Amino acid sequence: MTVADPAGGLRAAFRGHPAGVAVLTATGPDGPVGMTASSVASVGVDPPAVSFSTARDSRLAGALAGGGTVVVHLLDDTDTGLAAAFAVPGAERFGAGVRWMALPTGEPWLVDVGTALRCRVLSVSEVGASLLVAAEVVELLGLRRRGRPLVWVGRAYRGVPVEDEDAVTVAADARPAPGRSPYADG
């Protein structure tokens, strides 16, 4: 079967393919920036790395130009409002109602999100109007699930029921102090 509109066909195909939801934050030239992403994926564990994509003209892309760092906040269904707020183009993402703090290294950390990874950008590749980013995980800012895993499917955020809650609650309430890396020696 041939599709006359490959971009429209891709959107339709992925509309039924669930993707985990994350919020990415960084510090740009004008302060904190952030966006909701459903493109975050684990790349490997040696080194621990993730990938994600962003529009080439986004404020996040500008903050990551020339390398830099980003905090990847992995959301659960208690964070649906946060996901929606960070998805609105041009919206004030760090205003009233969003609890965040600047890490000692400068990045904005959404403190109510149970699992966050501070990452150092390894590479950025241009793919049309998007950038594909690979980043090494340098610090774990929490590994705590408060609700069901959050996915984006069918143009909506949905919590995914999990039979074995222990499988997704790996270290309940494990939250190292900011600035302390679980990957550092000593």
Image (cartoon, helix red, strand yellow):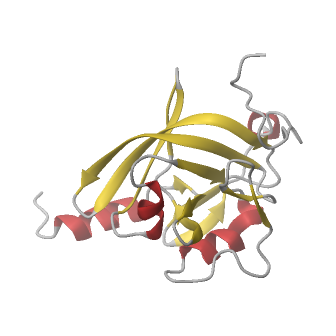
Relative to 49, residue 87 above or below: below
Question: Is residue 156 shown left or right of residue 1?
Answer: right
Residue at screen point 54% across, 80% down: 88
Relative to 67, residue 19 above or below: below
Residue at screen point 68% across, 24% down: 183
Relative to 10, residue 91 above or below: below
Residue at screen point 31% across, 60% down: 130
Image label count: 0
**Near-viewer residue (16 or 70):** 70
Question: How far across and how far down the image is residue 133, in percent?
Answer: 40, 47
**Near-viewer residue (44 or 164):** 44
Question: Is residue 165 shown left or right of residue 74?
Answer: right
**Near-viewer residue (16 or 26):** 26
Question: How far across and how far down the image is residue 56, in percent?
Answer: 33, 64
Residue at screen point 73% across, 65% down: 79
Question: How far across and how far down the image is residue 28, in percent?
Answer: 53, 64
In the rendered image, the quadrant that contains the C terminus is top right
Residue at the right extreme, as displayed:
173
In the rendered image, the quadrant that contains the N terminus is bottom left
Q: Quadrant of residue 168?
A: top right
**Near-viewer residue (164 or 69):** 69
Question: Is residue 86 shown left or right of residue 176?
Answer: left
Question: How far across and how far down the image is residue 181, in percent?
Answer: 73, 31
Relative to 177, residue 6 above or below: below
Residue at the front extreme, as displayed:
29
